[in-house]
Structures are given as structure tokens and as C-alpha cells.
Amino acid sequence: MTRIGDVVDTFFAQRAAIFKHVGYREDWRILPIVDYRSDYWSVDELEREHVRFSPDREALAYWLAHDDYGKYGDRLYENSIYTQRHLPRWVYRGKELTIVVVDTHTDGNQYLQLFANDREIKS
């Protein structure tokens, strides 16, 4: 039987391993990690304006090519990159995963959006 203390220890150890992988270090704010590894994604060229994402590769590719939702509006999403002044950058890339610091502008939600690198679509 697993003790809850062991579960908590594992949780924080795994969180630290994710941060090490991408080179992220918490500073001033502690933000939750939200898993979007199954979505396709793209950040703006300067990596400080927005991250666009979708569960549908074709939909995101269309949006990036046409700067329009087309028929895919119900499958396309965008978050602003949260340019927290305490961080040296806001997109943290590791070998397999990337964390984007985001602000959803909804109910004060700001978090670390976790993506798989093999699902990035370059615009």
C-alpha cells in the first residue's frame, strides 16, 4: 500500500525532473503545469506573444497558413504568452518537451502549458 507521503515525494521529484529537462526555474510565482502533449502547437516567431494549439493538425496548419479559422473555429485555441518579468524567457525547450508560460485571460488562469516537441508546427 502506497503512503500518501511517498506519493507527494514522487510528485515533487517528477515536477523537478520536468523543469530540469526544459531548463525552467521557478521565480516568484509558482504556476501549475497543464498537460497538452497530445495537441499540435505553434508559438509566434519571437516567442513572446501567443501559443496556438489544437488537437487537430490540419486545423492548426490551416490557421497558421491563412491567419483565419476557416471551418476549424471549434478546434483552435490561443493563449497569450505570460511575459512574467521575473523569468529570463517564457518558452522553455527541452529535447522532448517544451513548456510555455501562458495567461489565458480567463478567471486569472496562468500556468505552464506542456507540449511535446514532435507536435510543434513551425509557422
Image (tube, rainbow, N blue to C red):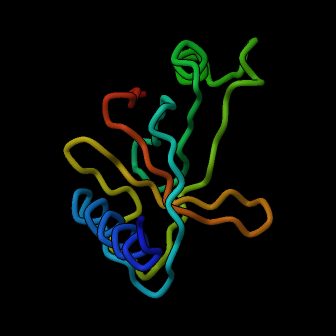
Give coordinates of residue 123: x percent, y percent: 42, 27
Picture layout, residue 54 above or below residue 78:
above
Question: Residue reaching furthest bottom?
Answer: 28
- The image quadrant that residue 104 belongs to is bottom right
Question: Residue reaching furthest left?
Answer: 95
Question: Residue reaching furthest front?
Answer: 1
Give coordinates of residue 88: x percent, y percent: 33, 73
Picture layout, residue 56 above or below residue 12:
above
Q: How many marks?
A: 0
Quarter of the picture containing the N terminus is bottom left
Horizontal side of residue 96 vs 48, given as left or right: left
Horizontal side of residue 108 vs 24, given as left or right: right
Give coordinates of residue 21: x percent, y percent: 22, 57
* Residue drawn at 51 percent across, 31 percent down: 39
* Residue drawn at 47 percent across, 75 percent down: 4
* Residue drawn at 38 percent across, 56 percent down: 91
Horizontal side of residue 17 vs 101, given as left or right: left
Picture layout, residue 67 above or below residue 102:
above
* Residue drawn at 50 percent across, 47 percent down: 35
Horizontal side of residue 2 vs 80, given as left or right: left
Task: Name the one closer to the observer, 67 or 20.
Answer: 20
Give coordinates of residue 100: x percent, y percent: 45, 54
